[in-house]
Amino acid sequence: MVTKILSSREEMLLEYLWEIDRPVTTSELSCLLSKDDWKKITIFKTIQSLCDKGFVEVTGFEKNVKTYARKLSPALTRSEFYAMKFSNNHMDEKLLIDITAAMVGGVALSKSDKDALVIEKLENIIESIKKEQKE
């Protein structure tokens, strides 16, 4: 499992790769990001760093004029990344409940009401997954 910390620039580039949702070459990525004022050298260095840290992997090659370019993809999903990020920050059960409550609008509730809301939402999620599995 990847456990290294990313810079804000690396995390931004990883977000772009998740949004694109397909393998891309560094040149293609450079064209896509030029509108957001990313410089080619910054993209190349950031991609290399993400590859070195294990967050981006080579998933193929594409012929580009006379050379071959690497096709790059995130090595883990957005969900896996944020789960890893939370677990690396030593998130405990209480913090998980507070985050879940905040996500479902229960920030200002008492502890017992917050717990009940989180349980209700998680039960709804479980039921939804069970229905999908039956279909």
Image (cartoon, rainbow, N blue to C red):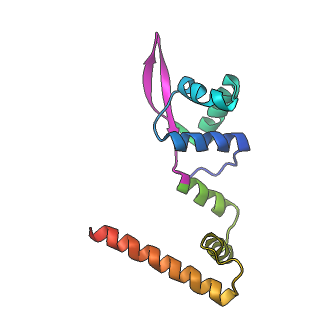
Q: Position of residue 4 (x, y in %)?
A: 67, 48
State the residue in front, 44 or 108: 108
Q: Is residue 107 above or below residue 79?
A: below
Q: Nearer the viewer, residue 55 or 23?
A: 23
Give the residue at x 60% y 57%: 82
Pick the front one: 6 or 110:
110
Question: What secondary structure is the stretch in magenta mostly built from?
Answer: strand
Give how far across and how far down residue 112 sits, in percent. 65, 90
* Quadrant hosting residue 90: bottom right
Q: Is residue 10 left or right of residue 129?
A: right
Question: Where is residue 43, by image quadrant?
Answer: top right
Q: Is residue 20 magenta?
A: no
**Which contiguous range is marked in magenta?**
58-78
Q: Which quadrant of the structure image shows residue 124? A: bottom left
The residue shown at (57%, 29%) is 32
Residue closer to the observer: 98 or 68:
98
> Does residue 60 appear to the left or right of 115 in the view shown?
left
